[in-house]
């Protein structure tokens, strides 16, 4: 009697399906977990979508802040002249 051929189990990690986002894993305090969960429920997003959305917003806010600092610096420079160094509070040293 012949034995039925069985497929060999592939070795290694399965190939990531196309269109899937990369995973970022990390631990957060319980209080933050509750806030993210509540915000996700309120917005109708999954917790993962909520965290991604909030991270995007934080980067957008940083970009807007840089534009505002640049505009303030340009305005003050044109008013005071370029001989006076302008340092805006909260700005990183360059």
Image: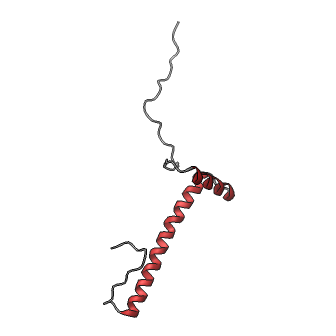
Give the total of numbered labels: 0
16 up-or-down from 66: above or below: above
Query: Eyeballing the image, is 56 above or below 3?
Result: below
* Left or right of 86, for residue 62: right
Q: Is residue 54 above or below residue 11?
A: below
Location of residue 5 in the rendering, given as x and y in whole percent from the top left corner? 50, 17
The answer to which quarter of the image holds residue 45 is bottom right
**In the image as oriented, which residue stretches furthest toward the left?**
83
x and y percentages locating residue 10 in the rendered image? 45, 29
- The residue at 57%/54% (across/down) is 32
Tell me the colour scheme of the image.
Answer: secondary structure
The residue located at (47%, 39%) in the rendering is: 15
Quadrant of the drawing holding the C terminus: bottom left
Q: How far across and how far down the image is residue 7, in percent? A: 49, 23
- Residue sitting nearer the eye, 27 or 15: 27
Query: Which residue is rendered at x = 44% and y = 79% of the image?
Result: 69
Residues 85 and 17: in front is: 85
Q: Position of residue 1 (x, y in %)?
A: 53, 6
């Amino acid at each position: 009697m012949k034995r039925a051929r069985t497929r060999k189990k592939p070795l290694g990690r399965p190939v990531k399906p196309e269109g899937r986002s990369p995973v970022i894993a990390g631990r957060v305090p319980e209080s933050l977990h509750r806030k993210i969960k509540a915000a996700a429920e309120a917005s109708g997003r999954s917790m993962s979508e909520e965290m991604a959305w909030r991270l995007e917003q934080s980067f957008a806010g940083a970009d807007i802040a840089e534009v505002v600092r640049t505009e303030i610096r340009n305005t003050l420079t044109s008013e005071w002249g370029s001989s006076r160094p302008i340092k805006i509070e909260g700005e990183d040293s360059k």
